[in-house]
Amino acid sequence: MSDTKTATAGQSLLPTYGRYPIALVKGEGSYLWDDQGKRYLDFMSGIAVTNLGHAPQKVKEALIKQLDELWHTSNLFRIPNQEEAAQLITENSSGDAVFFCNSGAEANEAAIKLARRYQQKIANNGRYEIITFEQSFHGRTLATLTATGQEKVKEGFAPLPEGFKYIPFNDIRAVEAAISDKTAAIMLELVQAEGGIIAADPQFVKDLKALCEAQGILLIIDEIQTGIGRTGKLFAHEHYGVEPDIFTLAKGLGSGFPVGATVAKEKLREAFGPGSHGSTFGGTPIATAAVKATLEQIVEEKLSERAAAAGEYLTAELRSKLADLPFVQGVRGLGLLVGIVCAGPVADIVTAAQERGLLVITAGPNVVRLLPNLLVTNEEMDTAVAILAELLAQA
Ligand code: PLP
């Protein structure tokens, strides 16, 4: 190895992330510890991933059992865990058929492909256009960053795939104006999370669904951040009383084990035949052991309902303790996906909270995002609210 190849460990990574100078090395429940032994109360859950807390016992046991038995075969064979995990999803949702992959971006990529293929091979209408919304976030692959309604994620990646249109969120007239005879699908998050914790208006979602049905357009709901109990229902679309044609999952689906899923209605089943889409690692025995254990626990222990109650408590506490602070403009969100909307940038609040032993993140420049696990206690929420109230009072 030449001298120019000697580098510290971190320098051997491409600089894709603005990282905090904290190395977290252990996690249990709502807490994380860094390599200096400092303890943090985790109110970000690895960005909505560790919904059952860190190293949850039942998922850990399922993973250890599976590690002992079998890690990987191939999707050329039946994978019993995958079949059972898919069945758990379909039994507990409006969806009928599942494709497993490894991340949120891949789940959305598959959703886009499935929608186009349905229109082109089943409906035989040649439609390909996907309408998405300003401020949305759908991932970092070429198609999903193109679907994302934020310019910053697209810079320097031209040429981008064709067939995407962006319109203002919660504006049904804009949707009507954007639809053409090429519109294959409309894709949205019901709470734009990366975009600043902006919930879809219930009437807008109902109108959107009616418009899609009337015009043979598929409705794709990105539940990657809102799914798996996070918003107080297993899937956020249950709040809205609409059944999407396709919805996508990742993040909390494996409690931290990487796995994603694209969930489709029956009419889309035949749009993907053998060879039309796939993934070497999609839905391995290990990944789907994590999915099964995660969903079983959330359903059996009614953790979505718990998240709804905890979200109400957290939101009410934040509203009462932050009410008089001039820097705070409001508190918004759904369930345990909560944003504190501020009058200016909040990056310094996030780092100050870290110093005080609390992990939170931003959602856009001016919103502090709170994503505790679904088992968070009132005492833990009180601690987080007290720290944030103190920091926001000084801002
Ligand atoms: N969609 C939404 C709503 C997300 O919040 C994210 C990630 O933050 C993604 C898609 C992309 O997921 P992943 O980072 O697993 O590719």
Image: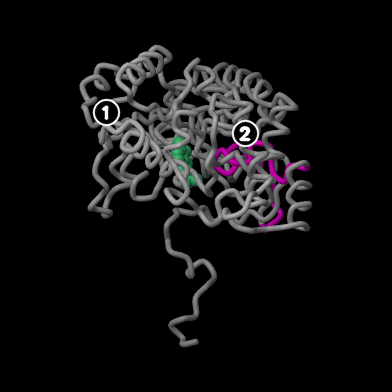
Mark number, residue 235: none
Looking at the image, is 251 positioned above or below residue 247? below
Compare marks 2 and 1 and give the one earlier in the sequence.
Answer: 1
Q: Which residue is mark 2?
A: 372
- Per the rendered image, the range of residues in magenta is 35-57
The percent coordinates of residue 316 (x first, y second) are 59, 17
Q: Residue at x 43, y 14 (%)?
A: 202
User: Could one spot residue 395 in this view of the protein?
Assistant: no
Q: Nearer the viewer, residue 167 or 2?
A: 167
- Identify residue type, mark 1: Ile
Q: How far apart are labels 2 and 1 at the CA level?
A: 31 Å
The percent coordinates of residue 120 (x first, y second) are 31, 37
- Identify residue type, mark 2: Pro
Q: Which residue is mark 1?
A: 167
The percent coordinates of residue 315 (x first, y second) are 57, 20
User: Could one spot residue 223 in this view of the protein?
Assistant: yes
Q: Residue at x 23, y 52 (%)?
A: 159
